[in-house]
Image: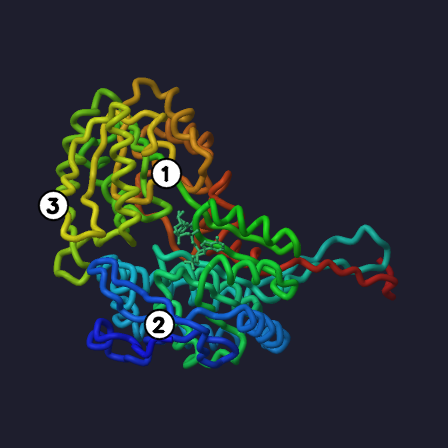
């Protein structure tokens, strides 16, 4: 095991160094595994610290701790759980700057984006703390004489929450807040690239007063830990955010114990520009929808469909907007786009560009010689994209935008829906007759018209087709962590 505890790369930046934890958090204790895993700063390639790799027996101990903590946690009043959640919320915001700095160090996004993610993440904690008080059931007009029929909503039990590296803070709180508010206990498995955001959340949870075992953070290899979580009969809900490939594996594994599964998987969003849309405005919005988090975003606008009449003007405007993106280390003043998560991601981005160019796409902009480091990929614009190209077919998860021209409105739905993904779609235009047809026909869980900003605590976030199952945020977020119990009180006195 390495002796090097968190390196100088982190400590000097933080006001509260105790937020940096390199051990896993199980049953209210900080626990060593059997070896360390290095965590890198993607902007510099430097090791910023290590997290511990848990052994199978420790994962099983965590599952047992969460199961033991469940009965007393669910027995608290909703108000009591809400009070602890609100203390967690307040501590998250109090330590916003440190949490954002940790995120920049391990994920690479700009400091402004990281601050935004902490706000976004905290908003779910507040929302579900409040909403937990309103987890109502129904009363049902009885078809049985002298009976009272009703439903109650019960917490499902222990929930395993498996999260990705692109939003290392908010993907945890969006799940955990819903699960905890309704009365579940949680086992959080963060991505190995970004464990520090998760562990800092656990440190703040401890300070907020969550009882031991209610929140646990397990670090180590996803394949090993998740298999144990999926196979355990004590884990009753599985909530995963990540790639469709891994989501399918987990669904197979979870089938053996018939868990309630919710899946937030990949996306391949179309961005439709209608002919009556102002071209400059559409290009500005498309750039914003494409390059957030360096394109490593399940909501990224990957396939941009533009009317032929405005096509070349759109490409010019898009390239002009794109040139304003400043690429660099997320800590540098004015930087709006950081590195990709790894060198492998850079190679994948180049492969996508090469494939498109070989199949006839025009490379309009994207000079990789200008990249400021090994893990950086400059914003890239491809025109004349076709459905045969990887940039159209795959969730490219990199800062490469693909644009296609269309001639008739009737081409739009077949093109936009030509993907196994169904997370989000964007529409820019004014004519409500066309907008309505698109709203009805787009096979996506979320459709945003004339707005890039669409997410938030109150909306049901989620996809259809191979983009996932279930919803996060909003009152529907509770569905993934609760079950409906129906009861019939029969043979009551007092007649009908
Ligand atoms: P990923 O490779 O699927 O990993 C996600 C999580 O699964 C990590 O915790 C990882 O742990 C674990 N894991 C990886 N391989 C595993 C395996 N064989 N068995 C069990 N668990 C395994 O996804 P990612 O690269 O981190 O994230 C990018 C993906 O997330 C994209 O597809 C993106 O669209 C999707 N995403 C979706 C949403 C949404 O709301 N729909 C939001 C954000 C991201 P290790 O790191 O330890 O391997």
Identify the residue at horizontal 60%, vertical 73% (top origin): 64
- Pointers 3 and 1 in contact (CB under 8 A)? no
Q: Residue at x 17, y 25 (%)?
A: 312
Q: Nearer the viewer, residue 393 or 139?
A: 393
Among the two numbered marks 2 and 1 on one chain, the one whose residue lies closer to the N terminus: 2
Question: Outermost residue toward the top?
Answer: 407
Instruction: Find residue 202 and report its horizontal and vertical position in percent.
Output: 42, 74
Q: Is residue 406 left or right of residue 232?
A: left
Please say if 266 is above or below 156.
above
Distance from mark 1 CB to nearest ligand 1 atom below 8 Å:
no
Q: Which residue is mark 1?
A: 269
Q: Nearer the viewer, residue 163 or 224?
A: 224
Q: Quadrant of the N terminus?
A: bottom left
Q: Residue furthest front?
A: 1
Crowd tier of the residue under label 1, counting other residues whose Cα lies within 10 Å: few below 14, some 14–19, many 20 or above: many
Left/right placement of residue 66 relative to residue 282 reads: right
The answer to which of marks 3 and 1 sits earlier in the sequence is: 1
Q: Is residue 77 visible?
A: no
Q: Which residue is mark 2?
A: 92
Q: Residue at x 21, y 58 (%)?
A: 43
For disc 2, the neighbor class at 10 Å (few under 14, some 14 to 19, many from 20) is many
Q: Which residue is mark 3?
A: 370
Q: Secondary structure at mark 1?
A: strand
User: Disc 3 on helix, strand or loop?
Assistant: helix
Question: Dividing the picture into quarters, in which one does residue 73 lie?
Answer: bottom right
Report the number of numbered marks: 3
CA gap, disc 2 and disc 3: 37 Å
Q: Work out whether mark 2 precedes mark 3 in sequence or the reverse, and give the earlier one.
A: 2
Camera-near label (3 vs 1) is 3
Can you tell me whether the CB of the residue at mark 2 lies under 8 Å from the nearest atom of ligand 1? no
Image location (x, y in percent) of residue 111? 22, 62
Residue for point 24% across, 73% down: 10
């Amino acid at each position: 095991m390495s002796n090097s505890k968190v390196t100088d790369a982190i400590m000097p930046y933080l006001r509260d160094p105790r937020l940096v934890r390199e051990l896993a958090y199980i049953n209210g204790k900080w626990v060593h595994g059997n070896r360390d895993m290095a965590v890198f700063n993607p902007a510099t390639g430097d090791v910023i610290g290590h997290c511990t790799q848990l052994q199978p027996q420790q994962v099983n101990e965590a599952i047992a701790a969460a199961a033991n903590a469940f009965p007393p946690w669910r027995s608290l009043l909703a108000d009591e759980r809400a009070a602890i959640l609100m203390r967690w919320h307040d501590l998250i915001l109090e330590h916003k700057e440190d949490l954002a700095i940790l995120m920049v160090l391990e994920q690479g996004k700009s400091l402004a984006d990281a601050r935004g993610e902490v706000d976004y993440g905290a908003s779910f904690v507040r929302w579900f703390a409040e909403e937990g008080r309103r987890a109502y059931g129904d009363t049902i007009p009885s078809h049985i004489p002298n009976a009272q029929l009703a439903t109650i909503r019960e917490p499902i039990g222990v929930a395993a929450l498996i999260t990705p590296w692109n939003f290392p803070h908010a993907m945890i709180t969006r799940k955990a807040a819903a699960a905890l508010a309704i009365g579940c206990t949680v086992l959080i498995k963060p991505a190995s690239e970004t464990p520090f955001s998760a562990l800092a959340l656990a440190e703040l949870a401890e300070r907020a007063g969550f009882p031991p075992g209610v929140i646990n953070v397990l670090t180590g290899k996803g394949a090993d830990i998740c298999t144990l979580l999926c196979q355990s009969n004590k884990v009753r809900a599985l909530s995963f955010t990540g790639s469709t490939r891994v989501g399918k594996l987990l669904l197979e594994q979870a089938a053996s114990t018939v868990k309630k599964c919710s899946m937030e998987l990949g996306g391949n969003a179309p961005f439709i520009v209608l002919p009556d849309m102002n071209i400059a405005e559409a290009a500005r919005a498309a750039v914003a929808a494409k390059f957030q988090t360096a394109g490593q975003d399940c909501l990224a606008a990957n396939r941009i469909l533009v009317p032929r009449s405005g096509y070349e003007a759109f490409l010019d405007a898009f390239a002009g907007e794109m040139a304003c993106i400043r690429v660099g280390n997320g800590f540098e003043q004015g930087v709006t786009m950081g590195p990709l998560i790894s060198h492998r991601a850079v190679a994948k981005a180049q492969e996508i560009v090469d494939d498109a160019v070989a199949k006839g796409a025009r490379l309009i902009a994207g000079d990789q010689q200008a990249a400021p480091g090994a893990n950086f990929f400059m914003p890239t614009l491809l025109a004349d994209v076709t459905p045969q190209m990887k940039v159209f077919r795959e969730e490219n998860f990199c800062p490469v935008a693909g644009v296609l021209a269309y001639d008739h409105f009737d081409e739009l739905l077949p093109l936009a829906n030509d993907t196994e993904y169904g997370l989000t779609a964007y529409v820019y235009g004014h004519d409500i007759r066309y907008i309505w047809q698109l709203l009805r026909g787009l096979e996506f869980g979320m459709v945003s018209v004339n707005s890039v900003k669409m997410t938030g605590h109150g909306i049901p976030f989620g996809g259809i087709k191979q983009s996932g199952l279930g919803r996060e945020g909003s009152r529907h977020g509770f569905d993934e962590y609760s079950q409906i119990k129906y009861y019939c009180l029969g043979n009551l006195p007092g007649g009908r």
